[in-house]
Amino acid sequence: MFKGVKQDTLTILTGLGGPDCGMEFEIGKTYVVYASNKQTNRCRRNSLADSNTDLGKLKYLFQTDFSANIGVTTNSVLTDNEAYFFNSELLAQRKDFDFHQKKVAFVLSGSFIDKQQYFKNWGDKDVVNSLILLTEEEKQKANGYDAIIVSWRKQGVSNSFKKRLLKKLS
């Protein structure tokens, strides 16, 4: 529970499905539910917790024991909480890549920033990120970086842009 009063039992009202946008929940599964006045529907961002890209951001926003260890240093190797944040945030892009103990570079538009700047500016906001996962050969050329997170780049991430970033990291 991120907001509201924590209770042992919580009743959420929803429609039956179909045109009333009712949400179906399976017993025994854990969900992230967006509700207002104890009501929700399928049109909200509800989803199973293990496939919810908001979970890291919600922990960052509402759990001080989680956020206290995020973006504290400029060290490019991610802490456990930072890894959890990006594993959640970039779930669809990362596939089976795990951010734990990974060295990550951050790019805002076209300029490198450190992770402290990233979290100060974007940790609690919805951000358009593109994830570049580096091959073993690219990691060697890029001083051991495992990945690059590019934020707010209107032109997308082309091969030539990726090559320029790798050259700057070497």
Image (cartoon, rainbow, N blue to C red):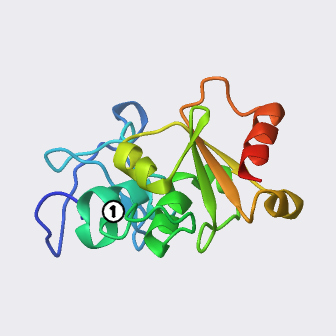
Vertical order, 144 against 3 (above or below): below
- Residue at point 18% right, 65% down? 10
Could you tell me residue 132's position as x and y percent? Answer: 71, 48
Residue 95 visible, this orientation:
no
How many C-alpha atoms fall within 10 Å of the one at disc 1: few (<14), some, or many (≥20)?
Answer: some
Q: Nearer the viewer, residue 118 or 43?
A: 118
**Which residue is situated farthest in the right direction here?**
137
Give the residue at x 18% y 71%: 9
How many marks the image carries: the answer is: 1
Query: Which one is nearer the viewer's eye here, 97 or 148?
Result: 148
**Which residue: 30% across, 42% down?**
15
126 horizontally vs 15: left or right? right
The residue furthest left is 5
Q: Which residue shows up at 52% across the image and 58% down it?
A: 86
140 or 42: nearer the viewer? 140
Label 1, secondary structure: give it: helix
- Residue 69: image location, x then y, percent: 36, 70
* Residue corresponding to mark 1: 59
Residue 35 in the image: state x and y as whole percent. Answer: 24, 48
Identify the residue at the far top of this view.
Answer: 155
- Residue 163 shows up from this direction: yes
Residue 58 quadrant: bottom left
On-image quarter of the N terminus: bottom left
Is 140 on the left or on the right of 133, as rendered? right
Q: For the residue marked with disc 1, what is the amino acid?
A: Lys
Looking at the picture, how far across and down is residue 133, in whole percent? 74, 54
Residue 161 in which image quadrant = top right
